[in-house]
Image (tube, coloured by chain):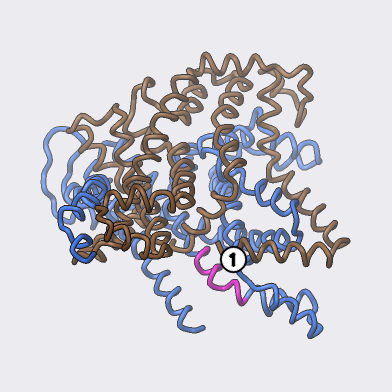
Amino acid sequence: MRYGKEGKNRVKINEAKVSTSNKIIIAFLTVFAFSSLFPLIWLLDFSLVKAGDLFASNILIWPDPPLWSNYATAWVDGKIPQFLFNSVFVTSLTIVITIFVSITMGYAFTRMRWKLSKFCLTLILLGMMIPIHATLLPNFIVFNKLGLINSYLGLLIPYIAFGMPVGTFIMTGFLESIPVALEESAVIDGCGVFRIIFSIILPLLKPAMVTVAVMTFLSTWNEFIMAVTFLNDDKLRTLPFAVMNFAGQYSSNYSVQFAVMMITAIPSVIVYIFLNEQITKGVTMGAVKG
Amino acid sequence: MHKILSNKLTIFLLVFPGLLLFIFALFVPIFLSVYYGMTDYSGMGKLNFIGFDNFINIFTNDPVFWHSVRNALLLGIGFVVIQHPLCIVFAILLDRIGNKIEKVYRTVFFIPCVISTVVTTKMWVNILDPNVGMLNKVLDAVGLGFLKQEWLGNPKTALLSVLFICIWQGFGWGMLIYYSGLKGISEELYEAAKIDGATSMQVYSRITLPLLKPVIRINVTLAMIAALKQMETVYLATNGGPGDATQFLANYLYIRAFSRFEYGYANAISVIFVIICLLATIISNKLLASDKEGY
């Protein structure tokens, strides 16, 4: 990305230039960051104390000692392993298939010559504007008729279909920036299109693949409204459900409820911290198209 | 080369699986919605074709529909008037710090955006809870106890609370997009302005904001569309209540279909919902395009 380089230059200039006003800015940002993340700190705090402590008038309570047993209860009674497995399974399959489909489509749209290319690309990109909520009702009926309600496929199909537009958009953009010369010589050497895609294009597409993977991860991992609509069996439900389920079952045991919420939140925060740059890129690339 | 690249079978194999899935899960449902929208289907049993009755009813005889549209507009205005100015200010501040701290704060501000809406919404539901919630305790602690409320249960404060949760959750997205917009502005412009003796206020109002204009437009568009599509937070926090005070379109059609078993009517809302979203996108794209010509 272009701004990456410029950003680095600016850092150098800034470091030399402003330092006292910087301290004020940093202090201000710290206060704001603290207050905007305070709800999460509150959540963490009360997930580590006794359930009844939330009824006291304290805004925060020092967890002494932290009650990790809340997390153990959450893990077992919240059926976290089951939900976690489903989330990991559905999310990873969605990511792999979305990337695969986005690459093959992206390749067909940028390299292959066919009449409907423009039309099909527009159609796919139109998908970015269609709200998932508008497909819930008809898909519920269709999935019901086809027996896809209460099956992994019932989630995978819409997740991939909704991941594809952004994926294809990013892949197409990236493929356009790759010079065709390499592929031309491969063709002369007698390579077919699929060999070209897998042995030449795939390695070059790595950064785009990471971006698509990360974007798909965030939307699939946190998706919940389709999961509510298309699944009604705990055996198949994904992690956001643990929160819903537990809130109903243990409505007064706030600590364990909060622990379930923390357990649900932590994986995506970890992924975010590790793949920070890719997510930043993905967010801004997605935004440019809208 | 040419021959290989226009091989029909190859193209078919590359495009067909994805396209089929896409049409099956996205386009077919929309057309089905149009069909069901013209019936009085309840979700089971028989259905009668009733033409445009549902659509006419929605427009002439459904105050909740209009209320939902109004709420979406209010949320959109909330994004544009409250969230975005904050986003811009913080993006500028972040952009000015430089070094590692800049990166740390950029990461910190985005954290709420990567956490599942289920978690953040349920968290806010607990914070706003009249019995155990943090907000009422904080109000007590700072001597504003008279403001204590059942925030999500009181029709007067429920909508404001829901809007606040949405604004809180989306802050990081907005800021990140402005932030990368700022990174695209050349440092030389700032240097030149400094040399010409511009104050920092002048730099921001004469250089930063005008150059950020395209990004502002994109971001405002995204915010309006996000406001129209709002569902998860409302569904989890209030489910549109109390009464229909916090109703939004997506949630409303969901309730009509799955709680009130008016599947046909709900599909008619769904169709109008898609049309509104498409129109909003097209109008804003037109605005964006005319903006580009202006430069």
Question: Left of A274 or right of it: where is B68?
Answer: left
| Magenta range | B210-219
B80 lies above or below A95: below
- For the residue pair A167 and B165, the one nearer the viewer reads as A167
- For the residue pair A190 and A2, the one nearer the viewer reads as A190
What colour is chain A? Answer: brown
Residue A241 place in picture, x, y as percent: 45, 28
- For the residue pair B163 and A167, the one nearer the viewer reads as A167
| Chain coloured blue | B
Quarter holding the N terminus of chain B is bottom left
Amino acid under label 1?
Gly
Residue B168 place in picture, x, y as percent: 61, 48
A22 lies above or below A104: below
A284 lies above or below B194: above
A158 lies above or below B61: above
Query: Measuring 34% from the left and 25% from the top, which residue is drawn there?
Result: A232
- SS for callout 1: helix
Membership of B212 in magenta stretch: yes
Question: Left of A209 or right of it: where is B149?
Answer: right
Residue at the limit of the structure toward the front, as seen here: A189
Residue at the limit of the structure toward the right, as seen here: A20
Residue B20 place in picture, x, y as percent: 21, 47
Q: Can the viewer see residue B240?
A: no
The residue beneath circle 1 is B181
Query: Measuring 69% from the left and 72% from the top, which residue is drawn there?
Result: B187
